[in-house]
Image (cartoon, rainbow, N blue to C red):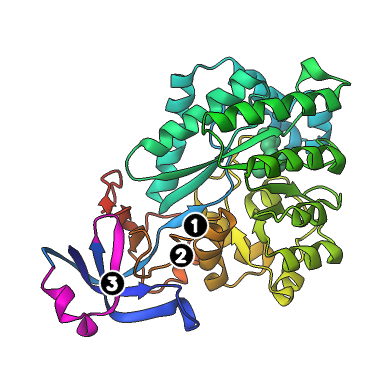
Amino acid sequence: MKLYRDARLATLDGDTPWGAIENGALLVDGSRIAWVGELAALPAELAVQVQEEQHLHAAWVTPGLIDCHTHLVYGGLRAKEFEARLAGVSYEEIARSGGGIRSTVNSTRQMGESALLKSARRRLAALKSDGVTTLEIKSGYGLSLVDEARMLQVARRLGHEDGISVQTTFLALHALPPEYEGRADDYVSDALGWLEKLHEHQLVDAVDAFCERIAFSPAQVERLFAMARQLGLPVKLHAEQLSDQGGAQLAARYGALSCDHLEWLSEEGIAAMAAAGTVAVLLPGAFQFLRETKLPPVRLLREAGVPMAVSTDHNPGSSPLLSLRLAMHLACLHFGLSPEEALRGATVQAARALGLADRGRLRAGLRADFCVWDIDHPRELSYWMGGALLRRRVCAGLETEENPHG
Ligand code: DI6
Ligand code: FE
């Protein structure tokens, strides 16, 4: 076993601030944490099993960061659209005139698996170099069986590479592709068939949809959720991002893992999420990049006891954000999270949003996913706007080499 010692641990376990442990040690057995605590308390029967010691010189250690909502795999960019928006055109106008998600669909359909893999891997490297050890990747820029399958294959392949764990999500109900213009219900019917096939090939860990005026109606989303339930797949929803569609209540009725965005979330939606144990995933990158002004009801969510996760929503149209730490910073600044809530949001609550019980904290028995940081206090993770703070990153017990800052 490998002992990481002389650490300051932000375990995020228990009720103490940050779950902090001074003079801490972390014992790793293969891919798992075998023991966490004050070094002086390490049981003798474990101490004799230590084969290797790493001194961390009082550096802070946190759980590995978890990015629970990304659209990392896609072709093309939307920087021109960004310019148009700066000149006054709205995101919804761009979407309605055939740009937006559809333009990314065009580019994605033209790219083969290896080109998609290469471009996504570059973006993934940025997220990893800032502490991400688990991320979710959605489909939703293919919008046909073969193109959605290719996106999910790429996500799976990234997940088989060392130093990262990937959860895949089927998001065919993201936008209506041009060949189905005026036939949204037929598209939904076809997408249900694709879901069955992709699930058979074990390409799908969860099911998501974009419930919005410019996307799919609650009734259409419900057909998808009913199929997901039949297949035993968990659901989540892009809900109340640009308007209140009652998506949160619908998702909660299906026991959704999470509802994401939530700027227009109603009090009924909050109550439904609280009752169902659904996580609220806050996406301040999209809020900022779209220059939204309507804030998600963070205070009410907090009062209702709804867990709040924080994620990048990385995508080319509404959140070209490649740092989960910067998302934490933006969640504090725009949405009023405390730095500790933001860190818990990108670890403990993000794990919950993915339905993963084996990570998100530093605790014996969980995966050995953790980060060693160049900081004097964990609040700095939400304070700095960028910077190279990560010293070491361990994923499933494996220390990966890609970080140049060590
Ligand atoms: N909401 C979003 O913010 C992203 N997808 C979604 O359903 C935007 C995706 C894009 O503009 O490409
Ligand atoms: Fe999204």
Mark 1 to mark 3: distance in Å? 27 Å
* Mark 1 and mark 2 residues within 8 Å of each other at the beta carbon: yes
Whether residue 273 is situated above or below residue 102 in the rendered picture:
below
The reply to whether residue 7 is visible in this rendering is yes
Whether residue 398 is situated above or below residue 298 in the rendered picture:
above
Q: Quadrant of ligand 1?
A: top right
Q: Amino acid at mark 2?
A: Leu
Residue 282 is situated, as x and y percent measured from the top left of the image, at: 66, 57
- Point out which mark residue 292 bears: none
Mark 1 to mark 2: distance in Å? 6 Å
- Name the front one of labels 1 and 3: 3
Q: Amino acid at mark 3?
A: Trp
Residue that carries the numbered disc 2 in the rendered image:
381
Mark 3 to mark 2: distance in Å? 25 Å
Q: Quick one: which residue is furthest to the front in this view?
A: 230
Q: Residues within 10 Å of mark 1 (few under 14, many from 20)?
A: many
Examine the structure image and report whether residue 51 is included in the region drawn in magenta: no
Q: Quick one: which residue is furthest to the right in this view?
A: 182
- Any atom of ligand 2 within 8 Å of the CB at mark 1? no
Quadrant of res 70: top right
* Mark 3 and mark 2 residues within 8 Å of each other at the beta carbon: no
Whether residue 304 is situated above or below residue 193 in the rendered picture:
below
Q: Residues within 10 Å of mark 2 (few under 14, many from 20)?
A: many
Residue 247 is situated, as x and y percent measured from the top left of the image, at: 81, 51
Residue that carries the numbered disc 1 in the rendered image:
325
